[in-house]
Amino acid sequence: MDLFDDLPLPTEDLHTAIGPGAVLMRGLGRAGDVQMLQAVESIIAQAPLLQPHTPGGYTMSIQTTRCGSVGWLSEPGGYRYSTINPRTGQPWPAIPACLMDFAIDAATQAGYPDFVPDSCMINQYLPGNKLGLHQDRDERDLRAPVVSLSLGLPAIFLFGGLQRTGKTQRYRLAHGDVVVWGGPSRLAFHGILPLAHGDHALVGQRRLNVTFRRVLPA
Ligand code: SIN
Ligand code: FE2
């Protein structure tokens, strides 16, 4: 578990600008963590985690699922959003109210008061799992930000600019930390370094990342 999890949070310097229109908000998700974790587990029970295969024939190391009116798919023909979970033939589960409220509040605090997500992706990282540098660019509505909540083991988040080859900064994302990127940073390259081993008191030997997006124009 995170050594500093039990210490009170400092009252200042909780929000760090990490790029134009991009902010890291430390600990914002801690207050509601138990309820949000339960909500995530209920989504996983309805729409099981799977390792996506990329169109290029690569199997990602992380395990993913989704909720919301549209869910991201990685298929041989490319990436797309779909209203149906192809594994179950059913619509994705709705975004649970506690997660929806959290995402809207986080976006508002980051300067995006009109954000209403229609898609939520759950990524599970086991020790060693990583996510290579990429852009989130499959959403039709790129005016809306991406809101990302980290639960469980800490990870190193890479955040760069609009070019893959550009310089990246490293940020440690711990349980409850939130990153929001939008506006001029909406298409910033980002990724996650291989997860270190550990055991988080609430979440166990893994990291859960919950990202909220607006896919279809509001
Ligand atoms: C993502 O890039 O969509 C997820 C990033 C993360 O796991 O923090
Ligand atoms: Fe991403």
Image: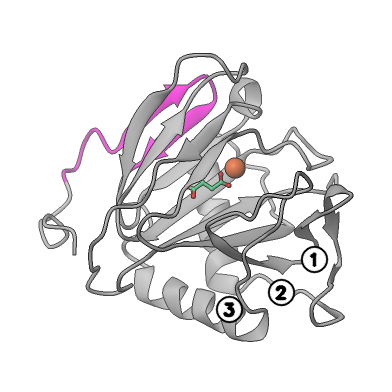
Specify whether 174 is left or right of 99: left
- Which comes sooner in the sequence, label 1 or label 2? 1
Specify whether 76 is left or right of 108: right
Which quadrant of the rendered structure holds the N terminus?
Answer: bottom left
Where residue 75 appears, x then y in whole percent?
82, 56
- The Cα–Cα distance between marks 2 and 3, rounded to whole angstroms, is 12 Å
- Which comes sooner in the sequence, label 1 or label 3? 3
Specify whether 206 is left or right of 199: right
* Residue carrying label 1: 69
Badge 1 element: loop
Badge 3 element: helix
- The Cα–Cα distance between marks 1 and 2, rounded to whole angstroms, is 7 Å
Q: Nearer the viewer, residue 162 or 9?
A: 162
Q: Which residues are magenta?
A: 10-25
Q: Residue furthest front?
A: 57
Observer-side mark, 1 or 3, equals 3
Indicate the amino acid at tag 3: Ile
- Which comes sooner in the sequence, label 2 or label 3? 3
Magenta stretch: includes residue 24: yes
* Residue carrying label 2: 94
Q: Are marks 2 and 3 in contact (CB under 8 Å)?
A: no
Q: Residue at x 12, y 62 (%)?
A: 6
Q: Is mark 1 within 8 Å of ligand 1?
A: no
Q: Nearer the viewer, residue 98 or 212?
A: 212
Q: Are marks 1 and 2 in contact (CB under 8 Å)?
A: yes
Indicate the amino acid at tag 1: Ser
* Residue carrying label 3: 44
Mark 2 nearby-residue class (10 Å; few <14, some 14–19, many ≥20): some
Q: Residue at x 36, y 49 (%)?
A: 177
